[in-house]
Amino acid sequence: MSVEPAVLTPGDTEGTGQPDPPGGRTAWASLRPLVLRLHFYAGVLIAPFLLVAAVTGLLYAASYQAEKIVYADELRVPVGGSELPVSRQVAAAREAHPEGEVSAVRPSPEDGATTRVLLSGVPGVNPDHTLAVFVNPYTGELTGALEQYGSSGALPLRTWIDEFHRDLHLGQTGRLYSELAASWLWVTAAGGLVLWFGRRRSRRTLRGTSGRRRTLSLHGTVGVWVAIGLFFVSATGLTWSTYAGQSVTDLREAVGQTTPVLTEGVAPGGEHAGHGGHPGAGAPTGTRGADIGLDAVLSTARAERLSDPVEIVPPADSSSAYVVRQIQRSWPEKQDAVAIDPGTGEVTDVVRFADYPLLAKLTRWGIDAHTGVLFGLPNQIVLIGLAGGLVLLIVLGYRMWWQRGRGSAFGRPLPRGAWQKVPPHVLVPLMAAVAVLGYFVPLLGIPLAAFLAVDVVLGEVAHRRGKRTYAAAD
């Protein structure tokens, strides 16, 4: 959220140009100009990044339904009598696509859904992606082949929008934009809430207002309604960002709240990678007979209560196990996983989602809600509403800035020196908290420090210029 750059007059703690009533100056009145200045500059300077994140996030939330329509021919088939063994479906896919290696198989999760055979190392396919070959589970016929990305199984349309939202297709450097937006979103939202609820009730209403005050009232009302959602989007977006996300990972490791993973047969990478092993798990056998095959592995996983949808990952090498894991990210989550010895068919390790530490569960739920899969279509509708609300807030914020200049120019910035009016017993703890927060969320701390440095320099320049003007006049 952003707010109009109202210039406070002496005794004016509301930014309306009207002085406060006698006795109205309080500790809040001293703190409010500082909050207003921070909120204004965050809105003006960070809003473009927030606008891009909101628009691309809206597109991503809608991409799930679009994907079902665009790729309906690959994803759905008429329901048949009985499904073929998984091994025969994989053989059909390999006959048509002998290139690359089978990295995983996702059997048909429901009636009428196709099986996905995922191939890695395919020429012409992004090394970070796989080629998903779609197989009719009833006939073994192929319905198509598309590039797939990530554990959510994103196909080309959703992958393109996902990467656009995450890094603007600029790679690792582009991720800084989205982390900057997530780092400042909660700050602008919190500042807007504090300012809104700090206003006297009579100045919040839309009734009987016009011009800038009406815009301000509408801006504040929309901001209050979407604030909780914006806090959530900001916090969950930071959990897998580059720098703040690493701080979250370090914190989880420090308090023993990492996501448990199988001790064998799990390929590196993904959300679960690098968090440590699951205690008490068995070790690879090292020797084995003939491979028991995909069908026996799936049957063993079913006996371990792994229901659809699941993904089967073949052994990475001669000392690794098959891994079968549930991949349902909608409520209720299905994230159980088992490791199965290829030679004996014995289960050598089990990880249950029910046994995840609390922070690991919250992280999983938060990410899935942020991406719109936790509650399916209602989740996606809420995200679209939040994104639309954020866009409206930004537009209204810039409109207030323009209206402050009476329609001919953007309004003047808020006056400097607001921090000097804050009592020391409030200012010192506040500065300490900001310093700690900026250390763990660097794309909040670094821009804030840069703004303060520039502001101090500009203030000193203006002060010296004023002294020279006064001396010349004297």
Image (cartoon, grey):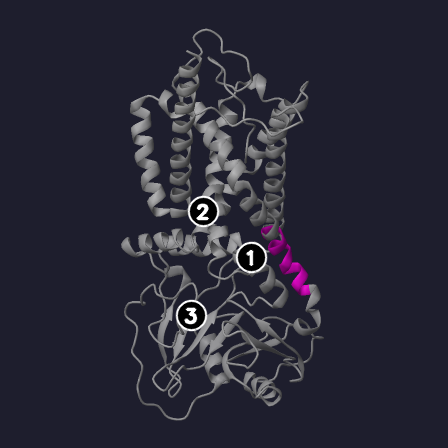
Would residue 298 appear left or right of 250 to someone viewing this image? right
- Estimate the x, y position of residue 460 in percent, counting from the top left: 38, 28
Q: Looking at this view, is 178 or 73 the one in front?
A: 178
Secondary structure category for the residue under label 2 = helix
Q: Nearer the viewer, mark 3 or mark 2?
A: 2
Q: Which residue, as the protein is rendered here, is positioned at the far top?
A: 22
Q: CA distance from mark 3 to mark 2?
A: 27 Å
Q: Is residue 407 above or below residue 208?
A: below
- 222 falls in the magenta region: no
The residue depicted at 46 percent of the width and 71 percent of the height is 325
Magenta-tinted stretch: 57-68
Residue 149 in view: yes
Q: CA distance from mark 1 to mark 3?
A: 34 Å
Q: Earlier in the sequence, mark 2 or mark 1?
A: 1
Residue named by callout 1:
168
Q: What's under tag 1, amino acid-wise?
A: Leu
Quarter containing the C terminus: top left
- Estimate the x, y position of residue 154 in percent, counting from the top left: 57, 66
Q: Is residue 326 above or below residue 432?
A: below
